[in-house]
Structure formats: structure tokens, C-alpha cells
Image (tube, rainbow, N blue to C red):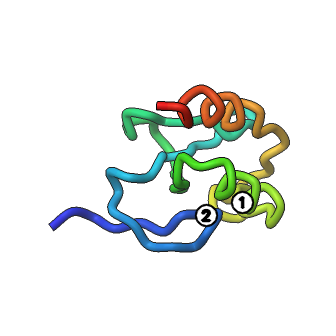
Amino acid sequence: MEPVRTCLGCRQRAPRSSLLRIVARDGRAVVDAAARLPGRGAWLHPDRGCLDAAVRRKAFGRALRTAITDTTDLSEWTDRHMDK
């Protein structure tokens, strides 16, 4: 049975393989595509709506337990990969 995680944006539970792992690096939220970077991780659907909801609710800071000041890496990654 595959592990289940909760999306920060929509709060829906989904299989880990359908979500992106997000980690904090120097005050930025970055995508951990391989899910191998050290540290606390948060999970998000690769969807602009979920990203916008998580940013609006300031969910990254709470989930990662650190101040997140920049989410542009997530926006760029989502824009690049949404068409695929």
C-alpha cells in the first residue's frame, strides 16, 4: 500500500506519488522532485490552484516550521510542468 499525504493547498489526501515534496532552503520553498533532500517536507499537488491556496493561507511556513519568504521557485516549476 502506497503512503498517503495531505496537500497543503486543497487539504485533500492523495498518494505520495501524485504530490510534490516541498522543502525549505534559505527562506525559500523549493521543489524536491526526487523526495530525497534532508529536512522537513510538505506536500502539494502540482497544480496552480493548490499552490495559490497554500500561499494565500501561509501554509508553507507552518508546515515547514520556518519563515518562508519566497515561493517563486514553486511558481516557476508549476508553470513549466503544468502543460505536461
Residue with the most extreme left position: 1
Nearest the camera: 26 or 55? 55
Dot 1 falls on a residue whose secondary structure is: helix
Q: What residue would you read off at disc 1? A: 54
User: Where is 22 relative to 44, above or below?
Assistant: above
Location of residue 12 in the rendering, given as x and y in whole percent from the top left corner = 51, 73
**Mark 2: amino acid:** Leu
Residue with the most extreme bottom position: 12
Q: Quadrant of the N terminus?
A: bottom left
In the image, is 62 to the left or to the right of 83?
Answer: right
Q: Quadrant location of residue 31?
A: top right
Q: What residue would you read off at disc 2? A: 8
**Mark 1: amino acid:** Ala
Nearest the camera: 42 or 17? 17
In the image, is 25 to the left or to the right of 13?
Answer: right
Dot 2 falls on a residue whose secondary structure is: loop
For image coordinates 49% across by 36% down, the residue present is 32
- N-term-proximal mark, 2 vs 1: 2
User: Where is 78 relative to 48, above or below?
Assistant: above
Nearest the camera: 79 or 22? 79
Location of residue 17 in the rendering, given as x and y in whole percent from the top left corner = 32, 51
User: Where is 15 relative to 18, above or below?
Assistant: below
Location of residue 66 in the rendering, given as x and y in whole percent from the top left corner = 73, 53
In the image, is 35 to the left or to the right of 31?
Answer: left
* Crowd class of label 2 (few under 14; some 14 to 19; many from 20; radius 10 Å): many
For image coordinates 72% across by 32% down, the residue present is 26
For image coordinates 35% across by 57% down, the residue present is 16
User: Where is 28 relative to 40, above or below?
Assistant: above
Q: Report how far apart the C-alphas of labels 2 and 1 lie in the structure.
A: 6 Å
* Crowd class of label 1 (few under 14; some 14 to 19; many from 20; radius 10 Å): some
